[in-house]
Amino acid sequence: MITFFRRFFQSKIGIAVTLAFLGLIAFAFASADVSSTGTFGGVSGGDRVAVVGDEKISTSDLSRAASNAVDSMRQQNPTISMEEFIGQGGLQRVLDQVLEQTAISEFAETYGLRAGTNLVNSEIMSIPVFRGADGNFDEDAYRQALAQRGLTDASVRDELRNGLLAKQILLPASFGATAPDKLAVQYASLLRETRKGAIAVLPSTAFAPDNDPTAPQLQGYYEENQADFIRPERRIIRYLSFDDSAVGDLATPTAAEVAARYEENKEAFAASEQRTITQMIVATQAAANAIRDRVNSGGSLAVAAREAGLQTAQLGPISKDDYAAQTSSAVADAVFAAAEGKVAQPARSGLGFHVVLVNDITRTAGKTLEQARAEIRTALTEEKRQAAIADLSADIEEKVDNGIALSDIAQELGVEVSTTRPVTGDGAIYGSSGKRVPQILGPALQTAFQMEESKPQLAAIVPGQLFLVFEVSEITRSAAAPLADIRERVIASWKLSEGLARARVAADRIMERIEGGATISAAMAAEEVTLPSFDTINMNREQLAQTGQQVPAPLALLFSMAEGTTKKLEAPSNAGWFVVRLDNIEEGTVAEDDPIFAQTKQQISSALEQEYGEQLRTAIKAEIGSETNETAVEAVRKQLTGER
């Protein structure tokens, strides 16, 4: 619901956006290093894109920030390229984020706020990606994660430090804001407000010219709108796969090998016993003996424990050695000497006297060498298979590292090299509807789009079982398609653009007729083209919010207009124009005991918190100040897009 209010009343999203870079560090390292990297200065320096207060932002900082932003976006859109990202204004957004982040950090330091080493360390240790298999912080995992993202320990620490400083400034400024009751009632009543009107659509196709553009017109349109015709990066991948069948027949384990393995693991084949027990611990031996006698005479250990204000615990199945390690040798000896269903003789550990009921006894008979022979032979055969495939994969990896050609590796393995058609970063075959790369390439696809040409790599698709050797044989960078290749598409886009411009003029004519007293139906009928019929609207904001979907832009406009007015709105993707007419507003009423009042008050309070954070951010940026070197920014843009 609060999204609904923001959409109609233009509330800003504040503190959540400011702190987004801290979350990106925690999940994907999508922010970039914005630490100071130099001592000479002024924004006029060729390697400086900006100066924020006393902090200098280098061209490498901006380049790294943009690259990390694209990497992050590829988690949702694998085909996005740097060229497309920059064409959509991404570089400027990244620069604005870096400038704002640096300004907040400068402001914090100016007024004595600090984020010390220990606090930063605690943040690093709490990030899940840096944890090992035991769930604790792992230095190796930390270093590996940084290396994969091309980051340094210093840059990550700077980012976390900046995020902690931002928290110290922004959270107190926005915390605890409360909307006045009168304001909450006013906004809540708007949800019960009913609006009546009409929405007409003027599609661009209805006004599009029939004739094709002239060559200069087409060329000019293409040059002005090249960002709309960018093709994704494509790569051709050559690959082969191999599994344990490549190692050939393995030698059968000998009788001596089987016997040696049996001797090495005699304990595993010896008879064993495990017990499931229920135990309680008391302070004195007298109390333990009394409880034991009572239970062995037909009483309940659980009842005895409850009456004594104690609790029982169930363990097992557990072996004698494991139980002794948890308690003591004396306790284990007593428990494993007792009969099933009986309470063992009380014995003492460091915690007190154990009263233990033996619930169940599971005994496993031992195996002789002959009985275990088949089992051992199978295990040895599997070990040899794993060793052989490991040796083979290591040998192939060495050949890959030494630059041996993929075709030579295939010849040695006796397999065929397969070649894909040009593929995009999401695994789709470029130019083929619905076709994708073979499934085996899926795990290696992301790596393939980061490789250089003709540099084979080895990947374990199924560890220890299935391996893939692959290389990129051809790279077609993301760029606008040549006009000659997409001429018909550009012509269609030009016609749609021309139709959009004419539809706007028609919308103005319709609005003039309506203002002159004509109905929307008559105003549309006066046009020389056939238009779709308009939609009549009669609904309130609550009904609009309950759809659970994003509110269509024409409806959003209808619910923000003054009664008796008509407005036009451009449809997305050059689709045309809307003409929106609001005829009548019926005000809604809400009492303070209405559940919607409390809900609205809480949501507006949350919006106020965010607004306060946004206002503080704006004030900080104004106070710290910044200068931007547009020449350096343009140089970064050219470097990222490969433009000369």
Image (cartoon, rainbow, N blue to C red):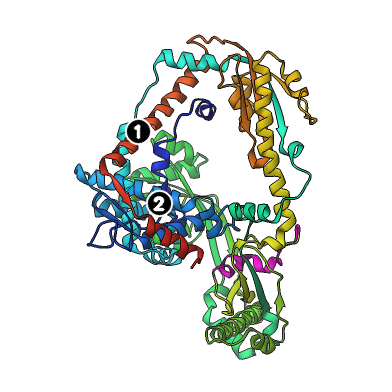
Q: Indicate whether residue 447 is drawn in magenta.
A: yes
Q: Nearer the viewer, residue 509 or 639?
A: 509
Residue at the location (71% across, 32% down)? 202
Residue toward you, 242 or 262: 242
Give the amino acid type for the residue marked by disc 1 in the picture. Answer: Gln
Q: Position of residue 539 (x, y in %)?
A: 66, 18
Callout 1: few (<14), some (14-19), or many (20+) C-alpha neighbours within 10 Å? some
Q: Which residue is mark 2?
A: 95
Instruction: Decide whether residue 583 is among the magenta residues.
Output: no
Q: Nearer the viewer, residue 418 or 144?
A: 418
- The residue type indicated by label 2 comes to Leu
Residue 349 makes an appearance in the image: no
Nearer to us of marks 1 and 2 is: 2
Give the SS element for disc 1. helix
Magenta range is 433-450
Between the C-alphas of marks 1 and 2, the distance is 20 Å
Determine the image quadrant of residue 546. Answer: top right
Examine the image and state in which quarter residue 435 appears. bottom right
Q: Is residue 296 above or below residue 253?
A: above
Residue 176 seen in the figure:
yes
Residue 567: numbered disc:
none
Q: Residue at x 65, y 88 (%)?
A: 408
The residue under label 1 is 615
Density class for disc 2 (Cα within 10 Å; few <14, some 14-19, many ≥20) is: many
- Residue displayed at 48% across by 42% down: 295
Q: Along the line of sight, which residue is nearer the eye, 110 or 508?
A: 508
